[in-house]
Image (cartoon, rainbow, N blue to C red):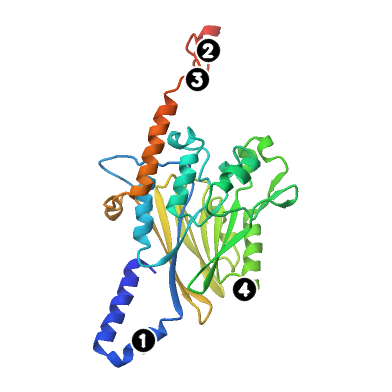
Amino acid sequence: MSKFRRFGRLLAATTVSATIVVGAPVAFAQEDHIVDFSVTNITDFHGHLSSQETDAPDANSEMGAAKLKALIEYVNQDQEYIMTTSGDNVGGSAFVSAIADDEPTLDVLNILGVDVSAVGNHEFDRGYDDLLGRIVEKSDYPLLGANVTLNGEPMLDASYVQEIDGVKVGFVGTVTTLTKNKVAPSAVEGVEFSDPVEATNKEADRLKESGEADVVVALMHEDAQQYAAGFNNNVDILFGGDSHQRSQGIIERDGAQPLHWAQGHEYGKVLQDADISFNKDTGEIESVEITQYDRSMPEVEALAPDADVAARVAAAEAQAEELGARVIGQMDRATFRGQDEGAGS
């Protein structure tokens, strides 16, 4: 349920209570079993901390981490929410983050309040030891990989459950099977990546059938549009990634809630927010609305950047300027891409 509809519900309830006082407690009691909350998502952030300063922002403009934090709070005002990502938080990063080994981005993601993330292929760039050590240790949230094994054993948690007002929300994270082809073989020696849809369906079945989760959200580091049709009825919402595309849709399913899916482009350009209304009496989702926000929207551009995130980004920018100015070597002549003029032909 969007924040505008939530406001409408509150306004209507206020009107009823003001005009029919006796009926007000009953009206409010009828709403006690309805829980409204949000799951918010970004994907393929890749350490893009800084904003793109432009006089004419558009849907492809990078809003920067500080405005992203302000937007997360804006779209979730007056409601409970869970902040998620679909992987590639670090690795293949913008210079401001890469020059400092992505330490600034790991800090910023914590400040953004990320609650859970799928692991992306770029988290394996320096090998699984670096992922399980440095990246996991510096992340104040779990990184999930239901389809990842190391020497035949699960390498990461398959799922994570967070409760909001009695509603148990389960998250299943997976990464593309192409990870093995996207990083150095030595980085993933002994690591296997199984089918992400099959792994998600299996874990979603377990979560729902065991009663561990009332709602299941798939965080998949793979293109959502390409794979959405393969998810079973126990997966309620899908947030994709990896392909750096922006898309969303709904798949109707016989005898079950439709699957709502979306993918939020790249580099923090899009924040997507799923407003969910859950009926605790029936144990069913009543509605899901996914909205994608970008910098071209006037209300987004008007937001003041978050001060804490802005300070961390400014520090990262200053550090990047200093590190980037260091001389690491010298060459006695220029080299050219494609051919070396000094070598002859």
Residue that numbered label 3 is attached to: 328
Which mark is in front, 4 or 3? Answer: 3
- Identify residue type, mark 4: Gly
Residue 340 tag number: 2
Q: Residue 57 appears at what percent x and percent y?
A: 29, 44
Q: Is the residue marked by circle 3 packed among few (<14), some (14-19), or many (20+) residues within 10 Å?
A: few
Q: CA distance from mark 1 to mark 4?
A: 30 Å
Q: Which residue is depicted at the point 42% across and 23% down? A: 325
Q: Are the residues tagged 4 and 3 within 8 Å (C-beta)?
A: no
Residue 211 tag number: 4
* Label whose residue precedes the other's in the sequence (2 or 1): 1
Instruction: Say whether residue 11 is left or right of residue 330.
Output: left
Q: Looking at the image, is 53 positioned above or below residue 26?
A: above
- In terms of depth relative to the viewer, which is nearer, 70 or 57? 70
Q: Looking at the image, is 245 positioned above or below residue 331?
A: below
Residue that numbered label 1 is attached to: 27
- In terms of depth relative to the viewer, which is nearer, 81 or 173? 81
Q: Which residue is depicted at the point 39% across and 69% down? A: 1
- Identify residue type, mark 1: Ala
